Amino acid sequence: MELYRSRSSQVWGWLCVGLGAVVLLIQLIGSGLEQIHVAFGIAVALAATGYAAFLRPSVAVAEDRVELRNVTQTVVAPFSRLAGLEAHWSLELVGDDGKKAGAFAAPSRTGSNRVKPAEEGKSAEVAGLVTAAWDAYRAKAGATAQPVTASAASPAFTRSPDWVGIGCVIAAVAGLALAFLA
């Protein structure tokens, strides 16, 4: 299974975790354990947010499926149910039932409103990875270019809660509550 995370997300994630540690360290050096709950709450909020929003989201490509791990949800998209993909604003998988699933880990815009022709965006990079794996799957399975439409009763993608991501969001909110409400 090939895993994709953008470099900028990793930088921002570790920056948040590091900033949380620095806040805690400055509090310990400056005031010791007095009012430590404020620094601890801020540190937990920064680290949990950095992990949940930047370090955890990913796109995993296997031989027969794509897995999108977003902040609070995981989507499994089997290639047999994939009808296409779009990479204009972000990587979006389109199922044979018409439903879409977006990847938080592969945004198209990198900070500016204008995308230069040489910079197609991160979603185009990961879209190439997904397309190559999807083509290999179809060649191996002997499938045609268009997938066989399954019954409308079953969804194309399996969505499930990402309990680790949800726990991180709860930890971030609890850290802020500890810092500013206690």
Image (tube, rainbow, N blue to C red):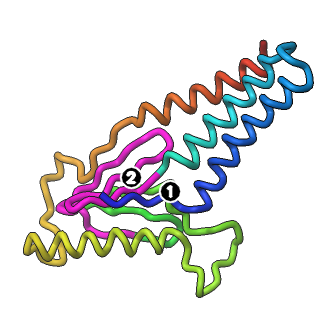
Q: Residues within 10 Å of mark 2 (few under 14, many from 20)?
A: many
Q: Is residue 79 left or right of residue 29?
A: left
In the image, what residue occupies the spot 45% across and 64% down?
A: 91
- Asked whether disc 1 touches disc 2, contact meaning CB atoms under 8 Å apart, the reply is yes
- The residue stretch that appears in magenta: 58-85
Instruction: From the image, give the main secondary structure of the stretch colored magenta.
Output: strand
The disc labelled 1 sits on which kind of residue?
A: Ala
For mark 2, give the secondary structure.
strand
Q: Residues within 10 Å of mark 1 (few under 14, many from 20)?
A: many
Tell me which corner region of the image, top left, top right, bottom left or bottom right, holds residue 118.
bottom right
Check the image and name the residue furthest to the right. Answer: 30
For mark 1, give the secondary structure.
strand
- Residue hosting label 2: 68
Screen quadrant of the C terminus: top right
Point out the tag, 1 or 2, that comes first from the N-terminus. 2
Tell me which corner region of the image, top left, top right, bottom left or bottom right, holds residue 79.
bottom left
- Residue hosting label 1: 105
Q: CA distance from mark 1 to mark 2?
A: 8 Å
- Residue situated in front as seen by the camera: 102 or 60: 60
Q: Relative to 90, say whether 43 is above or below.
A: above
- Residue situated in front as seen by the camera: 164 or 103: 164
x and y percentages locating residue 120 in the rendered image: 55, 79
Q: Is residue 162 left or right of residue 6?
A: left
- Residue situated in front as seen by the camera: 134 or 26: 26
Q: Is residue 95 left or right of residue 40?
A: left
